Structure formats: C-alpha cells, structure tokens
Image (cartoon, coloured by chain):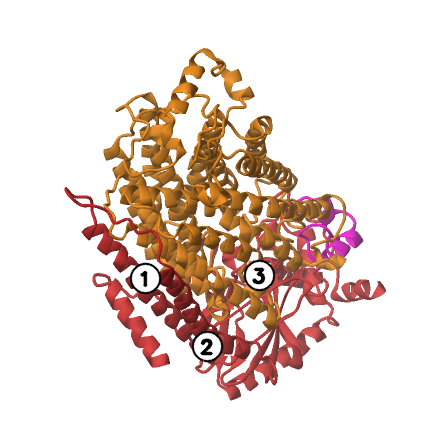
Chain colours: A orange, B red
C-alpha cells in the first residue's frame, strides 16, 4: 500500500489532467484514452443497435412495410460493420487501455502518443463509413462480409469510401495491438513472470498478435477491391480472368481469427470475474493460457468452414471440418475450468457475476451450434440461414457484449470511485438476458425451418418466430438505455467505492485507490 | 438411426413447446425427400443430442454450484485450483466424442461428392434475380422467375399460401433418377438451395460447381437463393417439381417441340404490334427487376430507359448494349440469355413504350444478323 500512497501524493502536486477539450484531444494518458474508447464504443453500439431495430421492425411481419430492400441491405451491412469494428473491438481496446497498465503495474501504455493517434483515427474512420449513408447510391449494401463481385463490379459508388474507412480502422487496430504487446512484454512489474500475468493480460497479448497477423490481410483484400473498382484490375472478376472465390479465402483468413479477436479478451475478463465472486482461485490457470493459445493457433487453419458450399474439393472440406471440430477441445477446457472455479466456491451474484455466468452458459450454447455448423454435410443445410445468424449472435451478444458489460460493472468502481446502482444493474442484466434469448433463440428454429439470412421479407411459415424475435430485439435494444443511465449515475455519484470493492477480487488494479488516480504506479510495485 | 432421429425430433419438439401446438411453430429441420437429406438429418439429430447431453452435464454442475454453493454465513469456499487428472480427462473425452462424430460426417460427405453416373444433367445458372435451368442433353432451357405480385409484397392484397416461394417455370425432374446439377452464375454469387433435397451449392461466376440429387417422392419442393446477391436477393425462389419418369419424358418432348417452334419464329415477319406485345412480357421477366416496369430505373445503378438517349437515339448502340452488356456495370449481356425474337421484342418495346414513341422496330432477323456480324 505504501507505493500506492506515494503515487497518490505525487499526483496532487504533479501534472494532472489538462483542462477542457484539449485534455481529450491531446491526452496521452491511458485512462483518458481508455475512457474515450469506451464512450466511442458505446455510441457505436447504440448506432449499430438502432440499425438492428430497423431490421427487426421490417422483419416483424411478412411483406415490406417500413423500408425498401435496398435500404434494408444497407442496414444489415452497416449494422454488422459498426458492431464488429465500432462497438466490440474498440470496447476491448478501451478495457485494455484502462486495465492492462493497472494489471501489470505499469505507469502507462508503452507508446502513449501512438495510443492517442490510434484512438482518434477511429472517429475519423466511422465518420467516413457512416457518411456513406447520405451519399448518392446509398451506403454499402453487400453484407459485412462484402463478397466480390457484389461489392466490386456491382457495388454502390460509396464502396471506395468504405474501403478507405476499413484501411483507417486497420491502421488504428494494428497500432493499438503493437501498443498492447509492447506494454505487456516490456513494462510488467518486477516479479511478474509471464505465467503470473492476469488472464485478461494474457488473452489480450494473444489477441494483439492475432490483430497484427490478420488486419493486414483485411487491408490487402480491400486494396484488391479498390484496384478492381477504380484501376481496372480483375482480382475478383471472372470475366477478366480473376477469381471470386479468392476473395472469400482472403477475407475469411482475416475473418475467422477476427471472431476470436472479439471473444478472447472477454474470456480473460470473465476469468477474473468468476473467481472474484466465487471467492476461490481460478481453476486451471495454466490450462486456460494454453487453451487460449491453442484456440488462437487453430483459428488460422479453419477459415474455409465459412465456405463449405463454394465447392472446395473434398480433401479441403474434410481438413477444414476436422480442424474446426478440434477448436471445441480447448474451448471446452475453458468452460469446464470456469464451472470448476464456481464449484464449491462461495458465490454471490452481483451484476458482473450475473453477466459472467450468462456469458458462460450462452456462449456455450453458441459453441454447440458452432460445433453443429462445423459438420460439413450438416452445414449444407445450415449455411446462410438464420441458424448461422443465431449462432454468431449467441457468441457475440452474450459472448463479447455480455463480457464487456461484466467487465464494465466489475471495474466501474475502480474507474469512477463510486459503486453503481446494484438494483438497476441487476435489472439491466435480466432485461438484457430475457430480451437477448427471445430475440436470438427463435432464430435457430427459423434457420432449421429454412429461412435464409439477409432477406427483407420472408415466406409465411416464418412469420410467428420472426415476430417473437423482433419483440425480443426491441426489449434488448431498449434495455441498453438503462446501462447508459447506470453509468452516468455512477460517474456522478453514489456510494464511495473502496480500493477493493469486491472481497474476492485479486490483482494489482485493486491495490490503487478508487477512483484510480490520474497517474498510477510511478514506482513499480513488487510482485511476489 | 433414421427412426430414432425422427422420434428424437418429435420428443424434442414436444418437450420444448408444451403450450405451442400450432403447425407454424416449426422447431426442427425436416428429414427431406432424398437419401442425402435424410443422412444430413440424422447427423444433425445425432450432434444435437450429443450437445444436449454435454449441456445437461456441464450446466447441471454449474446450476448445482449456483444453488448449493451460494455465500451463506459460515460458508468457507474451497481452495482447489488444479487437478491434472480431471484436466486430462476433460481434454481426452471431448476429443473422443469428436472422432465419433467425424466418422459418419465423413461418410456422408464422400457420398455427397460422388456426382458420377448421372441420368439427367441440368445446368443451373443464377442471374440477378432469377434462375435459368438448361437441360443440357435435351437442348432446351428456360428462366424461372418469381410470380409473387408486388401487391402481395406491399401488403395491398392478401398473401397467398406460397408467398415468395412461387415461380412461373419450376425446374422439373424425374423421380428416382440421379440428377446432376452444374451450378454457375452470370453476374454475382448466388446459392441454389432446396432444403428438402439437402442440396445447397453456391453459384459463382466463372466456376461450374457440381452436385447431385435423387428425389424419392413426387411433389413440389421449394427453396430460396441463400447468398446475398443484391437488392432482390429475397425474391428469387427455387421451385422443383418432381414427377414420375413417363410424365417427365412427355414434358421433355413438349419442351423440345416448343424450343423448336421458338427457333422458327425468328424467320417469321413480325409487325410492330406483335413485337410490342411480346416485348412487354419479355421486358417484365428480363429487365423490369432493375429498370422497373415503368422504365424509370433506379439511378444511379440502374438508369432510366424512359426518355433516355439509348432507347430513343442510335438503334445500333441500343442493340449493342442489350446484346453485349456494359462491362464494369450491372448491365448484363443478354445476347446469350434471350432468343433473337425476345431481343427484338424487348428492344422494340423499349423504343416505343412509356412515351418513347420512336415508331422504330428491329426484327428478329436483324438481331440475328447483328449477332453474327461480330
């Protein structure tokens, strides 16, 4: 505690945050940048969520009522892009910015100026992306997977802006990832060996390597599109000797690791929250680390399971099927470890724990449907139906998003110095939990009954479950406003939080006062 | 296995919907009408039950902890955090389960890839936004367009039973024969799917994918395009009519004869009125999806034809665009898609409809000459 007291004392007379807007524009402080990432991410979450509401409103009943198919396609595309690149990824970078230096006992991120730059690129990228909605010909309308040639020869004029926006996002992500790696590898407190690192730090280290490996691939594929659209090349145009399937191989070589980029940090956070509220150490720390490593490595050799129906040869089909099934093993280990952590603990269920437990259960359901999708022959029936939509929303909503909510509630006392309103937090959880399941579980049935994804209108036999799903979606969407209320209330005031508000929580972040002072760990702590 | 799977499905349905017994609340995949779809269905049920079993065990332990290991006065949490034996076990057991699942999946896949010794070959081509079926050995082919009216789609009239799943010309196949499907596309990627057959194959421009099916029961089977292919992706259904062999043979003979009559029409002397009448129909099926029934288009992607330079000025340029398309845009080359008669009719129609009244016409013979001069 003495090191902490020093930091605090220093803070009072040393340089604090600048005043006014320049504090945010010019800041190199990891906490300020983390906060900006989180605010940006939540803004994008609401924007992408609004688009989901438009989609679900149109799908409430058969027939076209609210929007035209052209705009519907823009909504599905923008919803996907904004949620993936604007909501989930920046939220995890925000958590990393706030928590990694606190968890490893570093005074800041290793490259603070680059940190500022990688954040401020994001609003620019999304300004460009969102502005395409107001351009002639409309926003990108070819799905977030932007398969060529629909996105090249047949894409709207705004596609070039979309490509530029993706480039900027990629630059931002890569710089963020370099920063995370540099911080973790160079700035850990004395005594914190790799195998003593908190799991959130471990999962982010691995995520950062995934980002560095695949974001350039994404940049490559959009650059090839740029060439096809504007400079007369034929990478993906069959009539010019190109290959539309090549697009999918390159895209999914990025795309599959990308889905783990969106879930691994949540694995890490949940691995802190479950032990804290079970008042028991995490079961199988080492195997958790190895499992994340194994998942990350396997994620590079399974991409073509998104492409079982494109007509790849049977040998390729079998390889990708087996490799994909194999991912179930390390993922299973993680789930078993979390359950074993809870087993014979002393459990309480505050909002972070509720979200974390729901994460484990619902992510596992998403994992089961993933396993079903891995079986190539069965995938011929599931592929591109609502079963797939159900699957990836089950891994992304209660996976990534619930993981982020759990983290936010867990660390809010540390960030703000106040406890959030527990009753409201629990209400937020239950509304989200019920709404989310109501929205996405019936999609399994719709897919199995034969409803294709990305359609603005559907045959009559799909009407009932679509209505249920829309009602659930509206409920889930509306309850996110509550989260905003809870956070604002918590920032403004509330019960004072101690340095260690959760009696079972462990780690260096709980050794600094709440709220965490502007500068922490000017003197590195000692880890035994 | 099949019987068990069916029973399992019924049981699952019963368990999950005690209160909902309406027919529309379909919960599960249906077994379908081909060997492949039945194999897929039993794979699906097997893996579903394995997942359910694993789920019961894992969530069972979890809920036990949630209820029994809550914090209470005097409750001391245990402190264990490792157990090598348990950890090895829960790595090995899932691996074994996966191997058990991989075996039947591999067998089914090998079977699905065997496209040899087919009785009927049909080339399936995806267009924005309709399908074309070419009976390769019989030398005829035709387009299959959605027939659901805009009035139904925009809720101006009651929706009929097969809303969005009905076409003018379904694919026709004989029951019991092995049908090889050669799947490709003309513009963007589409995907041809009939759930009851367990067949889904992407239609990719520049590629010809092969798949096959053998339908056991006569009937009408419906599916949809499953790869996002543009604005009317939701409106390009697949309908297949499976009929007994003799009925199929009669249908083929009829189609061949009709194709022959169609070829002869090229030689006929057409009047402007005849071409306009035929052109209106051909336009509705081939052009209206993009350029709209009233010729207003959807700029900038799909230019208006009403009052445009192309349809009111140089006839040769108009012919060239329709026959050869415009590269780098969504305008396809219709030279290979439509007969000379339909090309002539469409162009004549476009030059005279919607107040374009040029009074000009082009005959099928002129189209034929234009195509062959190149």
Question: Relative to residue A333, is residue B108 drawn left or right?
Answer: right
Residue A224: x, y in percent?
A: 70, 48
Which chain does the numbered disc 1 sit on? B
Residue A71: x, y in percent?
A: 51, 43
CA–CA distance in space, label 2 to label 1: 22 Å
Quarter of the image that includes the C terminus of chain B? bottom right
In this view of the protein, can residue A469 be seen by the observer? no
Which chain does the numbered disc 2 sit on? B
Q: Is residue A99 above or below residue B302?
A: above
Q: Which residue is mark 3?
A: A304
CA–CA distance in space, label 3 to label 1: 27 Å
Q: Nearer the viewer, residue A337 or B6?
A: A337
Q: Is residue A393 above or below residue B99?
A: above
Q: Are marks 2 and 1 in contact (CB under 8 Å)?
A: no
Residue B55, numbered circle: 1
Q: Earlier in the sequence, mark 2 or mark 1?
A: 1
Q: Kindly identify the residue that appears in the image at 46 percent across and 63 percent down.
A: A373
Residue B215: x, y in percent?
A: 48, 80
Question: Relative to residue A393, is residue A180 drawn left or right?
Answer: right
Q: Residue furthest left?
A: B73
The local crowd at label 1, few if under 14, some if 14 to 19, many if 20 or more residues have their Cα within 10 Å, is some
């Amino acid at each position: 505690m003495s090191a902490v007291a020093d930091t605090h004392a220093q803070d009072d007379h040393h340089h604090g945050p600048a005043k006014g807007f320049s504090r945010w524009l010019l800041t190199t402080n990891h906490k300020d940048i983390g906060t900006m990432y989180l605010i940006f991410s939540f803004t994008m979450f609401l924007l992408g969520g609004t688009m989901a509401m438009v989609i679900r409103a149109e799908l409430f009943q058969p027939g076209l009522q609210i929007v035209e198919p052209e705009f519907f396609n823009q909504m599905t595309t923008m919803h996907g892009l904004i949620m993936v690149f604007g909501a989930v990824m920046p939220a995890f970078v925000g958590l990393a910015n706030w928590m990694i230096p606190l968890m490893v006992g570093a005074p800041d991120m290793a490259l603070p100026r680059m940190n500022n730059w990688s954040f401020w690129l994001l609003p620019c990228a999304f300004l460009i992306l969102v502005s395409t909605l107001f351009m002639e010909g409309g926003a990108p309308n070819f799905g977030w997977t932007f398969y060529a040639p629909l996105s090249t020869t047949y894409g709207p004029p705004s596609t070039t802006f979309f490509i530029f926006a993706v480039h900027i996002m990629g630059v931002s992500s890569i710089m963020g990832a370099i920063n995370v790696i540099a911080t973790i590898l160079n700035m850990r407190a004395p005594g914190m060996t790799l195998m003593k690192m908190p799991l959130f730090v471990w999962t982010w280290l691995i995520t950062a390597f995934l980002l560095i490996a695949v974001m350039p691939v994404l940049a490559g594929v959009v650059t090839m599109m740029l060439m096809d659209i504007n400079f007369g090349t034929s990478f993906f145009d069959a009539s010019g000797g190109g290959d539309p399937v090549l697009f999918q191989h390159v895209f999914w070589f990025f795309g599959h690791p990308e889905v783990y980029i969106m879930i691994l940090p949540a694995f890490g956070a949940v691995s802190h929250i479950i032990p804290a509220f079970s008042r028991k150490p995490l079961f199988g720390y080492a195997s958790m680390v190895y499992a994340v490593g194994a998942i990350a490595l396997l994620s590079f050799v399974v991409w073509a399971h998104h492409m079982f129906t494109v007509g790849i040869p049977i040998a390729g089909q079998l390889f990708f099927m087996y490799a994909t099934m194999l991912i179930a093993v390390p993922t299973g280990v993680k789930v078993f470890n979390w359950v074993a952590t809870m087993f014979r603990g002393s459990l309480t269920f505050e909002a972070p724990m509720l979200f974390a437990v729901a994460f484990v259960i619902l992510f596992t359901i998403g994992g089961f449907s993933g396993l079903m999708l891995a079986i190539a022959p069965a995938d011929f029936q599931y592929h591109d139906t609502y079963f797939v939509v159900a699957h990836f929303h089950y891994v992304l909503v209660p996976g990534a998003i619930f993981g982020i909510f759990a983290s936010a509630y867990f660390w809010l006392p540390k960030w703000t110095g106040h406890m959030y309103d527990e009753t409201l937090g629990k209400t937020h959880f239950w509304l989200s939990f019920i709404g989310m399941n109501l929205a996405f579980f019936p999609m399994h049935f719709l897919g199995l009954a034969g409803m294709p994804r990305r359609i603005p209108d559907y045959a009559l036999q799909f009407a009932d479950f679509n209505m249920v799903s829309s009602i659930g979606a509206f409920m889930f969407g509306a309850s996110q406003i509550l989260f905003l209320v809870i956070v604002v209330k918590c920032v403004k005031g509330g019960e004072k939080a101690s340095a260690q508000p959760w009696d079972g929580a462990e780690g260096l972040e709980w050794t600094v006062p709440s709220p965490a002072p502007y500068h922490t760990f000017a003197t590195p702590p000692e880890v035994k | 296995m099949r019987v068990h799977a069916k029973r399992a499905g019924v049981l699952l349905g019963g368990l999950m919907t005690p209160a909902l017994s309406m027919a529309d609340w379909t919960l599960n995949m249906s077994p379908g009408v081909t060997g492949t779809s039945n194999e897929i269905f039993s794979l699906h049920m097997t893996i579903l039950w394995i997942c359910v079993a694993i789920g019961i065990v894992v969530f069972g332990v979890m809920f036990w902890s949630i209820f029994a290991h809550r914090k209470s006065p005097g409750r001391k949490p245990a402190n264990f955090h490792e157990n090598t034996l348990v950890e090895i076990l829960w790595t090995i057991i899932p691996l074994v389960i996966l191997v058990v699942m991989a075996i039947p999946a591999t067998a089914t896949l090998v079977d699905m890839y065997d496209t040899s010794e087919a009785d009927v070959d049909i080339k399936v081509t995806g267009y924005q936004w309709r399908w074309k079926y070419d009976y390769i050995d019989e030398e005829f082919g035709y387009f299959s367009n959605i027939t659901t009216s805009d009035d139904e789609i925009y809720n101006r009239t009651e929706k009929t039973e097969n809303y969005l799943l009905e076409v003018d010309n379904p694919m026709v196949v004989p029951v019991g024969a092995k049908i090889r499907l050669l799947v490709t596309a003309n513009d963007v990627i589409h995907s041809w799917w009939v759930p009851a057959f367990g067949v889904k194959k992407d239609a990719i421009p520049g590629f010809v994918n092969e798949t096959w099916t053998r339908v056991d029961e006569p009937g009408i089977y419906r599916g949809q395009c499953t790869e996002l292919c543009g604005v009317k992706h939701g409106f390009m259904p697949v309908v297949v009519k499976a009929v007994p062999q003799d009925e199929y043979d009669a249908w083929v003979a009829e189609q061949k004869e009709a194709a022959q009559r169609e070829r002869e029409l090229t030689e006929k002397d057409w009047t402007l009125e005849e071409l306009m009448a035929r052109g209106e129909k051909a336009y509705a099926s081939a052009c209206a999806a993009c350029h709209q029934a009233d010729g207003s288009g959807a700029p900038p992607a799909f230019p208006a034809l009403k009052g445009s330079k192309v349809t009111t000025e140089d006839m040769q340029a108009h012919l060239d665009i329709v026959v050869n398309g415009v590269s780098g845009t969504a305008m396809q080359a219709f030279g290979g898609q439509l007969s000379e008669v339909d090309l002539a009719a469409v162009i004549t129609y476009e030059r005279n409809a919607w107040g374009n009244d040029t009074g000009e016409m082009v005959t099928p013979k002129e189209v034929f000459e234009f195509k062959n001069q190149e």
